Image (cartoon, rainbow, N blue to C red):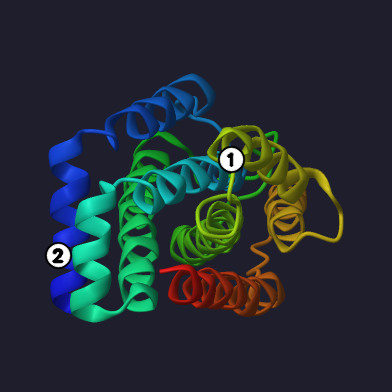
Amino acid sequence: MTALVRYQAALLARSHRWLPPFLVYAAFLAIGVQAGGPLLDAYGYAAAGLLPATVWLTRICATNEPPAARSCAAAAAGPGRAQLAALLTAAGAALLLALAGAAFVALLSDPYSAGHRTAVPVGPAAGAGLLTALVCLLLGSAAGALCSWPVLGRSGWGVPTGLVAALLLLVVGASPANAALTGMITGSQRGTVLVPWLPFAAALPLAAAAAALSCALAARRG
């Protein structure tokens, strides 16, 4: 599996298809994260932007291989394992974005609540911010896997379906991403750090199930 992930990572790096989502996410942070802004609000903002970026990266990695190369990788390691390597590569790229976003927020934001009324502990806030980003990453990975080959046969539907899925995951109240982001906003208003353990516990099996379905269909369809 390590060799497959390295192969997928090299393929992604050489294709330069990772550049647009990275640049869009960087612009999103530059526009929305203000110097001296509340720390928890900024972490929530950065995590929210990570979800559609992860959907984008997952779709890129799932469709990045030429058909001949995909057939060779599937013959050598199995189509399911090859698909899993693509999903893991996308998740790794999104994790780099999450870490960069968290560092950017930590550098620019002030460790205070909304209105700068209450001091917020930096360490717990960073932990909650990273966990919120992981929740969004996991759900973005799940949505990207379900909106790409082999789950979605028609490639033309992938982009609009992925955009709608990302929007729904952010705004629907039952979504773990929405719950985690709401916790960050509420914590900023109250001056308390709310760690999103329950949203993370809900997002993890959803991402695993989506990856399992994608890999199973890849193995069936070859």
Q: Residue at x 67, y 53 (%)?
A: 184
Residue 191's x, y, as percent? 69, 53
Residue 3 position by quadrant: bottom left
Q: Residue at x 39, y 45 (%)?
A: 106
Compared to residue 115, the image places residue 85 above or below, namely below
Of callouts 1 and 2, the N-terminal one = 2
Q: Give the quadrant of the C terminus.
A: bottom left
Cα distance between the residues tagged 1 and 2:
25 Å
Name the secondary structure under disc 2.
Answer: helix
Residue 135's x, y, as percent? 58, 63
In the visual, does 120 lie left or right of 127?
A: right
In the visual, does 101 lie left or right of 52?
A: left
Residue 141's x, y, as percent? 52, 58
Amino acid carrying mark 2 in the image: Arg
Please name the residue that numbered disc 2 is placed on. 6
In depth, the one of 13 and 119 nearer the eye is 13
Residue 53's x, y, as percent? 48, 41
Please name the residue that numbered disc 1 is placed on. 158
Compared to residue 214, the image places residue 16 above or below, namely above
Residue 1 is at least partly visible in this image = no
Q: Residue at x 54, y 64 (%)?
A: 138
Q: Give the quadrant of the N terminus.
A: bottom left
Name the secondary structure under disc 1.
Answer: helix
